Image (cartoon, rainbow, N blue to C red):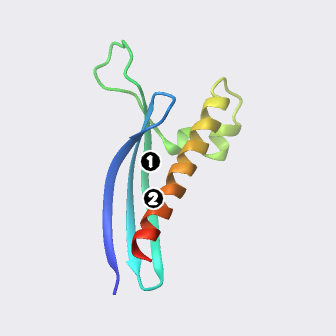
Amino acid sequence: KANLVTVSAKTNFSNDVTMNYRFDTSITGAGCIIVIRDVTYQNKQSDSVSFFPKVYTAEQTITDQAVNSVSSEREFRESLRNETLKFINELYLELSNQFN
């Protein structure tokens, strides 16, 4: 028997970026499986003209292609990718420890 749960949440990173994420987790007798469905990022709201914050997808920000592109944001993107992977790994460890 497997139990499936979908979670939507957000977390704040140290560089004034909020990560919104959605994932499914399935707990079976064999262990825990996490499927990341969505990851988007928002910069801290600045004094901009728009009421709505700008949203960046993971594909635009943390993929190999995005990080390796010639850009002034390369260091920021690498840092964001490292923080994201660290967060997801910690999330997996927390969930798997709850059900093992």
Q: How many neighbours does mark 2 have within 10 angstroms: few (below 14), some (14-19), or many (20 or more)?
A: some
Residue 21 visible in the snapshot: yes
In front: 60, or 82?
82
Query: With 43 as the anchor, is 3 left or right in this view?
Result: left
Determine which residue is flagged by label 2: 36
Q: Quadrant of the C terminus?
A: bottom left
Q: Secondary structure at mark 1?
A: strand
Q: Secondary structure at mark 2?
A: strand
Q: Considering only vertical position in the picture, is 85 above or below 40?
A: below
The image shows residue 38 at horizontal and vertical percentages of 42, 51
In front: 54, or 85?
85
Please report the residue visible at 51 percent of the width from the left and 50 percent of the height from the top.
Answer: 87
In front: 82, or 98?
98
The image shows residue 84 at horizontal and vertical percentages of 53, 46
Q: Considering only vertical position in the picture, is 5 above or below 53?
A: below
Residue 62 visible in the snapshot: no
Find out whether the residues at labels 2 and 1 contact each other: C-beta distance under 8 Å.
yes
Please report the residue visible at 46 percent of the width from the left and 57 percent of the height from the top.
Answer: 91
Q: Considering only vertical position in the picture, is 42 above or below 87?
A: above
Please report the residue visible at 33 percent of the width from the left and 87 percent of the height from the top.
Answer: 1
Determine which residue is flagged by label 1: 39
Q: Considering only vertical position in the picture, is 100 above or below 22?
A: below
